[in-house]
Amino acid sequence: MRFESVKSFVLTILVLLSILLTWGLWTYQPDYDTIENTTNIVRDVSISNTKEVSSLIRPTKVLFHFENQHFGTVDETNITTMVRDIRKWEIYDFTNISSTISSYDFLRFTQKPGHVQVLYPDEIPLTLFRPIYKLTDQNLPSVSFDRMIINMNVDDEKSGIVYFVSNANQLIYEAKVGSEYIDDFNRHYYQSSNSYPEYFSYSVTETKSIFLPKNKTPMHSVQYYTDFLDPEIFKEALFADPNIVKKHILTYGEEYTDGSKLLQVNAGRKYIQFVNPVNNTENTSVGSSDLIKSSIDFINDHGGWTDTYHFFSWNKFEQRTVFRLYVKNYPVFNKNGLTEIHQVWNKNEIMRYQRPLLVLEIPIPSAEIELPSGEVILKAISSQPDFQPHLLEDITLGYELIETPEKISVATLVPIWSYKYEGRWKRIDVPEELGGNEGGLE
């Protein structure tokens, strides 16, 4: 009888413990660490360097205008020093004065004696100038400019004047700076600018002109030992999960794909093209400043700035940006695209990314070359069949990168004149009777 009582008591205890444990399992909520959504995480792979906007968006030329003369510099050291000083200025009170200057007077205004033009390679959204200069206005207009003009003719003791100008749209915004900044710039740069090469103006149309050096320009050709980046590091950087990426060897090169995105490597392993199949049927444009900024951020995300690349051009309608290799502040051209980084965007996503794997390593200085004067260059261009001046967009000194077939690891930068005509850059072939040699980018 006593045994039965003990047995019943033990069973009762076990049942109660079972109920208690079951309730605990149902109601227990463990304190797990929060796990973030990983679908949008950028892979932490750094190929080379990251860069600030101010080091990528840089002036290509500075022009100083006097009564009957114009002087200019493209020298990297000179321009870097000037920009460093301008970046200290506080620029404020932007006002649109475009309506006060007629189309007839537009060129004369930009080239007015006492004006200094700081030229950029393409139009830059004003909001992107904020990381470069001290623009203190809270709300900046949504407009783009390809030059800043500094007015040396200071009448007001309290403030100086600078202008942000779009040559293509004949748009002029006036802004104020402290007069002491203008005085300093006048004393340090403008008054001594006659030590720079003299330039002359070539009027392409009534509203557009191109400034070219009056005399011959000495430049050095440069040889470089070169190297090529391993495409595998781009596979690691550009695919969300490199472990599922398959590699295929093809007749034209190599392919990497995860079943959606595609990374193509050309046969010589000299450049790559990354394709992200964004829905093309619904093209959503990225805003002007966002397009350039997104392009910079995308390359920064994988530390993709090898060598010295600068912003070169962009197309709002095609949603395309181009960054070009620069050496000593001169653009470098190559017919195979080994000096350009192209991006195409859609719906705020990268759709196409094409870039060289080539890296310049050690420079080997070579002989000095004298390039023809601007007058000779104009004769060479205008003598071409069916030349139409209004289709001429730009002319520049630069380099052409030429690979050496017998030396795989060596490339030569040859000084050249190039011109942009109907949207395409071409090397200028100067006939021998004008003092040049035959050759070309195409």
Image (spheres, rainbow, N blue to C red):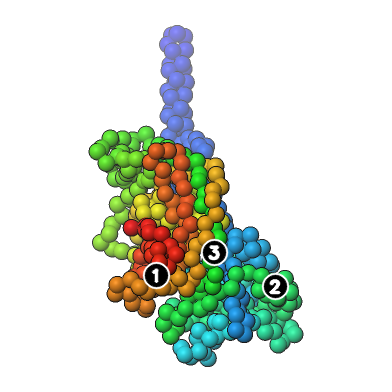
The residue mark sitting in front, 1 or 2, is: 1
Q: Which residue is mark 1?
A: 380
N-terminal-most mark, 3 or 1:
3
Q: Which residue is mark 3?
A: 217
**Going 33% across and 71% down the picture, which residue do you hit?**
384
What is the x, y in percent for residue 319? 37, 63
**Going 37% across and 57% down the picture, which residue do you hit?**
439
**Going 25% across and 37% down the picture, which residue do you hit?**
250
**Which of the image's four quarters has the C terminus?**
bottom left
Q: What is the spatial separation of the Cα atoms under label 3 and label 1, in whole angstroms? A: 16 Å
Image quarter of residue 39: top left
Label 2: state its secondary structure: loop
Q: What is the spatial separation of the Cα atoms under label 1 and label 2, in whole angstroms? A: 33 Å
Front residue of 220 and 167: 220
Front residue of 428 and 123: 428
Q: Which residue is mark 2?
A: 192
N-terminal-most mark, 1 or 2:
2
Q: Is residue 188 visible?
A: yes
What is the x, y in percent for residue 276? 33, 50
Front residue of 96 and 374: 374
What is the x, y in percent for residue 142? 49, 75
